[in-house]
Every structure is written in C-alpha cells, then in structure tokens.
Image (spheres, coloured by chain):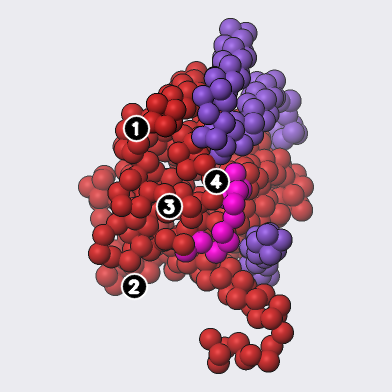
Chain colours: A purple, B red
C-alpha cells in the first residue's frame, strides 16, 4: 500500500526532474537576446496601459464556489457507488434523496442566476 | 533480469530501480506519443481543410516535424516580460506538466498493465489532473499581461465547471464494478461486456457522451477553447510563453488529450479487451480512435461563447449526469 504511494511520488519526482532538466538544457543551448523591447508584454503591439492585475469579475468567484460545493458532494457519491451493491435498495433510495437535495441546490443557484454572464 | 539486477543487491534497491524504470518508460512513451499526436493533429487538420500540412521535415509526409519543432523550442531565447512575477511565470509550465504525467501512474495500458495498481485509481486521476488548473492560473497571473490574466481566469472557470459533470459521469461505472481500481474495471469488462452498452446501453451511452464532452472541455480544445481564444485574447494564459516553457504547456495539453482518450477507452470501451491481438494493442487502438475523434471535433465545430460554455456545463451536463446516476442505480437493483 505504502509502496504504491511511493511509486506515485516517484512519478511526481521524475516529472519535476524531467521538466527542470529540460529547462537547464535549454538554458545552456538557447540564444540570448538583449533587445529590451522583447520583454514588453504582448498586447497587440501597443504599449500596455495600467497594471495587468486588473479587478476580477465576481463571476469567476461564484463559479469557484459552486465547484467547491459540488465537488465535495461528489466525494460523498464516490464511496457510495463503490459499496452500492451490498447496501441494497435502501442505500439507493438514500442516495436518491441526497442527489435530490443536491439538485435543489443546483436549481437554487440557477434561479439566483449564478450561471448568467453579463 | 538477473543480468540487470544482480541478486546480491538489497531487495529495496532493486524494487526502487524497477519502479524508477517503469516511471522512465512511461515518460518516454508519453513524450513519443505527444510528438506523434502533434504531427497527427497537423495532418488531420490539414486534410480536413484540403491542405497537405507538413510535408518536408524528414522526407515522408513531414514525419520529423515535431522533432524539428522540439529542437527549435529548446534553443529559442527565454523571454520573461517586464511586469511578470518571474518565479511564478517560470514555474507555471512545470506545475501544469507534472500532474499530466503523474496521472498516467494508474492507467492500464492493457490488461493488468498499469504501473501502479492503485485502489482509488479514478479518484486519483481526477484529483491530480485537477491540479493542472493551478499551473494555468499561475501562468495567467505571473505573466504580467492582461490577456494572460483573462485567459487564466476563464480557464479556471471552465476547468472547474466541467470537472463536475466529468467526475459525476463515471459514477455508473463505479456502481457496476464496485471498485475504483482501473485494472479491475478493465477486467470486469472482459468478453465484450463493455460499459458503453452493458449492462444498460442507455446509461452507458449517456455517461460516455457526458464524459467525452467534459473531457474535450478539460483539455481546452475547440469548441471549448475559450481560455486561449486567439481572436479575442491573443493566446490566453500562454500569450507570454515561448521556447521551452511553451513546449511544456503543449506537452501537458497533449498528454491530457491522450490521458482522456485512454480513460474513455478504459472506462467505457473495455480497455485492453479484444480478440486475437495482445491487450495493449487493443488499448492503443481504442485510445487513438478516441484521440482522432477529439481532433475531428476540434476541426469541425466553431468556438462556444463564454457564457453559453459555462451554462452548458451547469444547466445541461450536470443535471444529465445526476439523472444518469439515478438511472444507473435503478438498473443495478433491477438486475439484482
């Protein structure tokens, strides 16, 4: 069990080493430019106006919140799905109630126009 | 094996070497596959638009085009824009690529051919692939460019929105197998009991279609390529990326395409199940078939508008997957 996760960790480690190694190789091989104009942010050829860290639309935040809610609920559905057969018909109806409540939450968000983008 | 791993070595070191070897083999396979996919995408797109695509590099139908591109990207100069957050900017491609690679750990490339036989295989893949959003957000934030910022935020909104139906769509498969282990899922589908049409074709087809649509969106590909819509926000989150940093975003994107197609094959098309040929050949055949559909979709449909894109996920795909779960549960209990 622990060995499996060590293996997964090895995947993460090797991926990181591969990426950083490629960066180092590129650092050694690449051409070096000195023109300061190449470092201007590309905004269709004109000099950028103002800071790039602009105010964010609140929509993005709402979608992130909705995602957190529904993804956590999904985490409850997954373990149920694995043991649904032994739990039998009672477990199934309990999950139907759970999904119905979730669906109500979705309808509420819909009604409140959380999915609208203006 | 005796020659490569002398018996005198301590068992732990041998085990570690075997594990490292598997990781390295998968890394090599992914890199080669991605290079092939990039060439394939160019050829497929070209022929769909009555062009020829790359024809010169390497001679035969430009087969070496991806290699030439790789070398070009390796030796290009490194540009960090003036307003950028240099370390966030540089680390973003690594954060985007590493999850894409780590997701391959439990993927069975055939019958019992997974590097790590994880019991929570599906959950692991979804959890880790969700991390790549971080890389995209870092790229958007760290580039010091308004278009990058917008692209990064759009990407985050889209990826999290489509994550919900994608995760929900595979619940019927879990119901029928009673495990999240990907190798076990493949074994359960042996002898053409593919979950696409067994035990309930209606549930299987709906689940597969939702999974596939959400996967296309997760890979940021047309018609869901709002994060990098070139006619609106230049190139979205990777506007300021060039050279090797850009190469890693590209690598991550195609690694996710292959992963999504592979998952589709494993979950719904029986993975390595087939007749006569070895199981890994069947797996690759089905995966490349799905990859081709990915490309076909990309070069056929126009881009969604951003509001419709998000509404499609929340107002259509999510309710459909909820209904499909209930339908799948009914099937399960009607059968038993």
Looking at the picture, tell me which residue is in the foreground, B331 or B318: B331
Name, please, the residue furthest toward the left: B50
Mark 1 / mark 2, whichever is N-terminal:
2
Of the image marks 4 and 3, the number of the one nearer the N terminus = 4
Element at label 3: helix
Distance of label 3 from label 1 (alpha carbons): 17 Å
Horizontally, residue B137 falls left or right of residue A117, namely right
Residue at position x 74%, y 33% from top? A53
Q: Which residue is mark 2?
A: B58
Dot 3 or dot 1, earlier in sequence: 3
Residue A36 sits in quarter:
bottom right
Q: Quadrant of the C terminus of chain A?
A: top right
Earlier residue among tags 3 and 2: 2
Kind of element beneath mark 2? loop
What residue is at 38 percent from the left and 48 percent from the top?
B189
Residue numbers of the magenta segment: B113-125
Q: Callout 4: 10 Å neighbours few (<14), some, many (20+)?
A: many
- Majority secondary structure of magenta residues: loop
Q: Are marks 1 and 2 on the same chain?
A: yes
Residue B122 among magenta residues? yes
Q: From mark 2 to mark 4, how far is it between C-alphas?
A: 44 Å
Query: Which residue was labeled with disc 1?
Result: B200
* Among the two numbered marks 4 and 1 on one chain, the one whose residue lies closer to the N terminus: 4
On the same chain, marks 4 and 1? The answer is yes
Which chain is mark 3 on?
B
How far apart, in angstroms, are the residues tagged by discs 3 and 2?
38 Å
**Residue B234: image x %, image y %?**
53, 39
Q: Earlier in the sequence, mark 2 or mark 4?
A: 2
Task: Provide the residue designation for mark 4.
Answer: B180
- Tell me the number on the disc at residue B186: 3
Give yes or no for contact between labels 3 and 1 (Cβ–Cβ under 8 Å). no
């Amino acid at each position: 069990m622990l060995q499996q996760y060590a293996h997964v960790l090895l995947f993460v480690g090797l991926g990181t080493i591969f990426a950083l190694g490629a960066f180092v190789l590129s650092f050694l091989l690449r051409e070096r430019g000195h023109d300061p104009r190449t470092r201007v942010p590309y905004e269709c050829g004109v000099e950028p106006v103002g800071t790039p860290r602009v105010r964010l639309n609140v929509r993005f935040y709402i979608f992130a919140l909705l995602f957190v809610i529904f993804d956590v609920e999904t985490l409850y559905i997954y373990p149920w799905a694995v043991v649904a057969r032994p739990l039998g018909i009672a477990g199934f109806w309990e999950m139907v109630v759970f999904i119905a409540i979730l669906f109500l939450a979705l309808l509420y968000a819909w009604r409140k126009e959380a999915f609208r983008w203006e | 094996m005796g020659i490569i791993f002398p018996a005198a070595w301590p068992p732990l070191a041998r085990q570690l070497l075997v594990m490292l070897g598997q990781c390295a083999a998968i890394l090599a396979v992914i890199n080669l596959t991605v290079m092939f996919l990039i060439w394939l995408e160019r050829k497929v797109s070209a022929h769909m638009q009555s062009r020829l695509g790359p024809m010169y590099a390497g001679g035969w139908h430009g087969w070496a085009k991806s290699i030439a591109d790789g070398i070009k990207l390796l030796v290009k100069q490194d540009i960090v824009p003036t307003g950028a957050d240099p370390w966030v900017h540089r680390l973003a491609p690594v954060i985007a690529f590493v999850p894409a690679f780590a997701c391959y750990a439990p993927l069975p490339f055939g019958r019992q051919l997974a590097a790590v036989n994880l019991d929570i295989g599906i959950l692991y893949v979804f959890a880790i692939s969700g991390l790549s959003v971080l890389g995209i957000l870092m790229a958007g934030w760290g580039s010091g460019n308004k278009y990058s910022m917008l692209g990064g935020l759009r990407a985050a909104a889209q990826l999290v929105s489509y994550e919900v139906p994608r995760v929900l769509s595979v619940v019927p498969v879990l119901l029928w197998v009673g495990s999240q282990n990907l190798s076990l899922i493949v074994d359960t589908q042996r002898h053409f009991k593919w979950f696409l049409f067994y035990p309930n074709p209606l549930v299987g087809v709906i689940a597969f279609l939702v999974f596939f649509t959400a996967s296309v969106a997760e890979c940021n590909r047309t018609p869901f390529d709002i994060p990098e819509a070139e006619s609106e926000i230049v190139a979205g989150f990777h506007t300021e990326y060039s050279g090797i940093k850009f190469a890693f975003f590209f690598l991550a994107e195609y690694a996710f395409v292959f992963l999504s197609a592979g998952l589709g094959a494993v979950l719904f098309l029986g993975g390595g199940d087939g007749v006569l040929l070895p199981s890994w050949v069947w797996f690759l055949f089905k995966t490349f078939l799905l990859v081709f559909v990915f490309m076909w979709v990309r070069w056929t449909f126009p881009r969604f508008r951003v509001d419709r894109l998000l509404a499609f996920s929340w107002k259509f795909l999510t309710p459909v997957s909820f209904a499909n779960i209930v339908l799948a549960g009914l099937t399960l209990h009607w059968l038993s």
